[in-house]
Image (cartoon, rainbow, N blue to C red):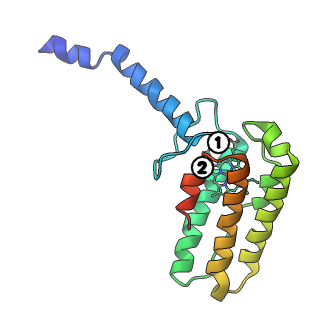
Amino acid sequence: MLRYCKFSFNPGFRQPAFLLAFLLGGYFFSCSAPKAASEPMPLNPNGDSELALLMRAMTGEAQVVKQQIEQGEAPWLGLDYEKILTAQASVPEKAASAAYQEHARSYLQTVKALREGDVANARPLYNNMVNACMSCHTALCPGPTVRIKQLY
Ligand code: HEC
């Protein structure tokens, strides 16, 4: 009995599971792979880029904004969204491409429209913003699209 317990807590058995969880975390959150729905965001094994952290904050804020709109409140977007143009990405070439910069600018337009728009139009303006997330991701980084679809 004692031996059994000792074995079940042997770090040699636990470590592979831990590593696997890390690897799967990287798999689900990377650009190239679909991501499991509604999981807490795990740490990227290579460290989180500035852009990845911004994206997570954007996802969190979009969730809050969606609720505000559903409750008839004025949406409040407090993040520094302009950082999307300069934040360091885990694959820097990707965020430096003309296509990325173009998508980023259209996205910023939709954020501006939502910030400045009427509460009465908030829902369609919000949808335009999520559409802009989707179009950049569909073109350049399809992994998180599963997560983004939940923002509609
Ligand atoms: C201009 C292109 C672009 C736009 C617009 C964009 N993203 Fe991203 N997103 C990226 C790129 C590129 C990455 C990969 C970042 C990295 O790994 O450094 C990313 C990563 C992510 C991730 C994964 C973050 C992580 O944990 O690694 C999520 C979630 C995400 N974006 C959600 C969103 C949401 C929600 C929006 C809109 C509110 C949005 N994105 C708008 C390009 C974009």
Q: Is residue 22 above or below residue 137?
A: above
Residue drawn at x 79%, y 41% is 94
Callout 2: CB less than 8 Å from ligand 1: yes
Residue drawn at x 52%, y 61% is 150
Horizontal placement of 131 versus 102: left or right?
left
**Residue sitting at the far top:** 3
Circle 2 crowding by C-alpha within 10 Å: few under 14, some 14–19, many from 20: many
Query: Which mark is on residue 31?
Result: 1
Horizontal placement of 6 versus 78: left or right?
left
Q: Are marks 1 and 2 in contact (CB under 8 Å)?
A: yes
The image quadrant that residue 15 belongs to is: top left
Percent from the top left, x then y, of residue 70?
52, 79
Callout 1: CB less than 8 Å from ligand 1: yes
Percent from the top left, x then y, of residue 49?
70, 40
Q: Secondary structure at mark 2?
A: loop
Residue 49 versus residue 32: which sits nearer the camera? 32
Query: Which mark is on residue 101?
Result: none
Percent from the top left, x then y, of residue 64?
55, 68
Residue drawn at x 48%, y 46% is 36
Q: Secondary structure at mark 1?
A: loop
Quickly name the residue at label 2.
144
The image quadrant that residue 131 belongs to is: bottom right
The kind of residue on which mark 2 rests is Pro
Residue drawn at x 73%, y 51% is 139
Q: If you read the primary sequence from the N terminus, does the residue marked by circle 1 or circle 2 appear first?
A: 1
The quarter of the picture where the N terminus appears is top left
